[in-house]
Amino acid sequence: MAEMTSPMPSPRETVETARFWQAAREGTLLYGSCRVCGNCHYYPRLACPFCLSDAVDWLPSRGMGEIYSYSIVRRATPPYVTAWVRLQEGITLFTNIVDCDAGALAIGTNVKLVFALSTDGHAIPVFTPIGPSFTLGSHAGST
Ligand SMILES: [Zn+2]
């Protein structure tokens, strides 16, 4: 789990979202993929938000993406980063960027999925930077 200095708020788990949260507890981020119109969506739903078909598969994301937009909430104690992250699967989700130098973030920064715990123990999908500006272990300097 990612280290957060403040606990994440607890999500409201419902019958429809229970499967999503169980997968998250097991380290998997699920998204929806429609077999009728071919669009992907997040969060996963029982019916496709584009064509309303119920032929929706809930698929595991690879958890790799980039920052589409972000904001540093400096007035909070401690400050934190909210962001829209676009995943390789084509979905975009609102999330937090954790374990980072907020001042070094940029639109297009590569990020990977990690999970943070909410106050009641839910695994919340958040992201942490990877890539040339953000090294995890050794770094060869490639793009
Ligand atoms: Zn559809």
Image (tube, helix red, strand yellow):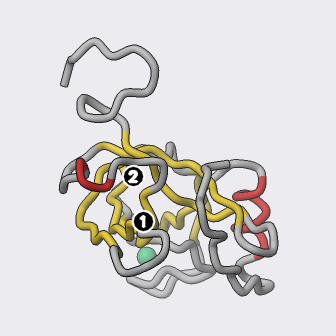
Q: Dots 2 and 1: beta carbons under 8 Å?
A: yes
Q: Can you see residue 39?
A: no
Q: Is residue 83 depicted above or below 76 in this figure?
A: above
Vertical placement of residue 35 versus 66, above or below: below
Asked if ligand 1 lies within 8 A of label 2, the reply is no
Q: Which mark is residue 40?
A: 1
Question: Does residue 67 appear left or right of residue 3 in this picture?
Answer: left
**Residue occupying the point 49% across, 64% down:** 33
User: What amino acid is at disc 1?
Assistant: Cys
| Coordinates of residue 60 in the picture (x, y in percent) | 59, 51
For mark 2, what is the residue?
A: 89
Q: Which mark is residue 25?
A: none
Nearest the eye: 48 or 108? 108
Q: Is residue 3 above or below residue 71?
A: above
Apparent side of residue 55 relative to residue 68 in the rendered image (left or right): right
Q: Quadrant of residue 95?
A: bottom left
139 left or right of 99? left
Ligand 1 image-quadrant field: bottom left
Which quarter of the picture shows residue 91?
A: bottom left
